[in-house]
Amino acid sequence: MARFEAPLQPSHPRHRPPSPSPPASRAELACLEGEIVACGKCPRLVEWRERVATTPKALSTGEPYWARPVPGFGDPDATLVVIGLAPAAHGGNRTGRVFTGDRSGDWLFAALWRAGYASQAQSLARNDGMVLTGAWISTAVRCAPPANRPSPEERDRCLPYLQRELELLTAARVVVGLGGFACDAVARAAGIRPRPRFAHLAEYRFDAKTLLCSYHPSQQNTFTGKLSQAMFDAVFARARALGA
Ligand code: SF4
């Protein structure tokens, strides 16, 4: 027998427009972005982000590398916040936009597009016209680290930026942490106790929000099938169901 789903009620979260963030929060987000981009507190990461820019990958368009900290990107009224580990050396560190210009970004933006948060499936460059509606993307650490491994000291030095960003995204209902490092960083920034144990689709409530954990869409996970497209889509379907 065919099954029909009842239409969503007007009170369902998907029908509720997010409350717009106060102008002060938007101004502070812009201010935070300026602070992040100018930051040079981690000598090892400053050296690395600039060094990789001198050995561009073949896929580079010939444009100069950004080679600075990469701020968050998206809709200040986001109900969904996605947090990754750090910019990729030849991705965000090249293009200047988080998850832009690398394979992980291809996976993430395609999933956000399928879920209705992104205006296009491909994220190629800062000027590619991408618009996020109801979503914000950022990272736990804002500078590309060698071997994708920031030290605990570098993480802690960068954490206040994430903390402020989460506070300023006042409409946020769900924070998706991509991988154990990002989930742990969100938990530290938000003061979640006891510290969450990472598992795909694990959920932790904090304030009026949910931390939703997901495997990171790294090539290591997507090539091996540890994270499939269906599994990744299920994360954003769950985020919608939780009010994002
Ligand atoms: S990782 Fe964060 S704290 Fe360290 S230099 Fe980059 S932006 Fe600054």
Image: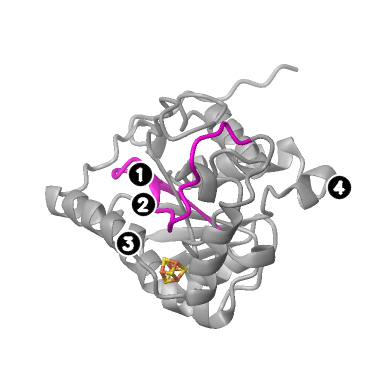
Query: Circles 3 and 1: CB distance less than 8 Å?
Result: no
Q: Earlier in the sequence, mark 1 or mark 2?
A: 1
Q: Earlier in the sequence, mark 4 or mark 3?
A: 3
Q: Position of residue 1 (x, y in %)?
A: 75, 17
Q: Earlier in the sequence, mark 4 or mark 1?
A: 1
**Is residue 54 at least partly visible in the picture?**
yes
The amino acid type found where label 1 is placed reads Ala
As drawn, the label of residue 78 is: 1
The amino acid type found where label 3 is placed reads Ala
Residue lying furthest top? 2
Query: Circles 1 and 2: CB distance less than 8 Å?
Result: yes
**Which residue is denoted by mark 4 in the rendering?**
224
**Which residue is denoted by mark 3 in the rendering?**
38
Q: Position of residue 156 (x, y in %)?
A: 47, 79
- Is the residue at mark 3 in contact range of ligand 1, meaning its CB lies under 8 Å from it? no
Residue lying furthest right? 224
Q: Nearer the viewer, mark 3 or mark 1?
A: 3
Q: What segment carries the magenta color? A: 60-85
Magenta stretch, main secondary structure, is loop
The amino acid type found where label 4 is placed reads Thr
Mark 3 to mark 2: distance in Å? 26 Å
Helix or strand or loop: what does disc 3 sit on?
Answer: loop
Mark 4 to mark 2: distance in Å? 32 Å
Q: Is residue 243 above or below residue 149?
A: above
